[in-house]
Image: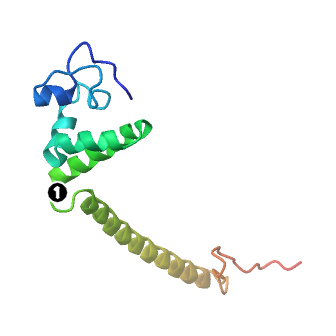
Amino acid sequence: MMTSSYSNSPCAACKFLRRKCNQDCIFAPYFPPEEPHKFANVHKVFGASNVSKLLNEVLPHQREDTVNSLAYEAEARIKDPVYGCVGFISGLQRQLLGLQKELDATNADLIQFTIQGSSSLGLGHVDYSNGFYNYPSNFEQ
């Protein structure tokens, strides 16, 4: 999402750094003036010089993804200075494991209730070995 705001107002980076934004500004396409917090966070965590060096080292078609990754990590680092986005990912993994255990327990309860229900209805043994409930048929052909 390139922005062509070179001539109107300085990009968020140049405005933050209080410098003149010119036509070849490396920050302008990725830090539009209407998103000053994006550059402020990236600058706070990584520094303008490091970001500039990084953007000059990556291929032009990779720069937008690079800036988006830096912005995401910077925001995560501000929220959690020690772990950043890794802490968020770990939290999601813990939540996923908890939900998987809950799902397994619910499935076990469901199987138990199905077996109890089939025996009380006189259906005999219920086969669940293939992942489907196979009730024995009372109709023989």
Q: Position of residue 19 (x, y in %)?
A: 13, 25
| In front of the other: 98 or 119 | 98
Q: Which image quadrant for residue 37?
A: top left
Q: Which image quadrant for residue 98?
A: bottom left
| Residue 7 appears left or right of 129 | left
Residue pictured at 39% horizontal, 75% vertical: 101
Residue farthest to the left, as pictured: 18
State the quadrant of the C terminus: bottom right
Residue 11 versus residue 63 in the image, above or below: above
State how many labels appear: 1
| Residue 110 appears left or right of 62 | right
Residue 130 versus residue 66 in the image, above or below: below
Q: Position of residue 55 (x, y in %)?
A: 31, 40
Q: Which image quadrant for residue 116?
A: bottom right
| In front of the other: 106 or 86 | 86
Residue pictured at 28% horizontal, 64% vertical: 91
| Residue 56 appears left or right of 125 | left
Q: Position of residue 103 (x, y in %)?
A: 44, 71
Residue 6 visible, this orientation: yes
Q: How is the image coloured?
A: rainbow
Q: Position of residue 14 (x, y in %)?
A: 17, 27
| In front of the other: 22 or 92 | 22
Q: Report which residue position mark 1 lands on.
A: 80
Q: Amino acid at mark 1?
A: Asp
State the quadrant of the N terminus: top left
Residue 87 versus residue 135 in the image, above or below: above
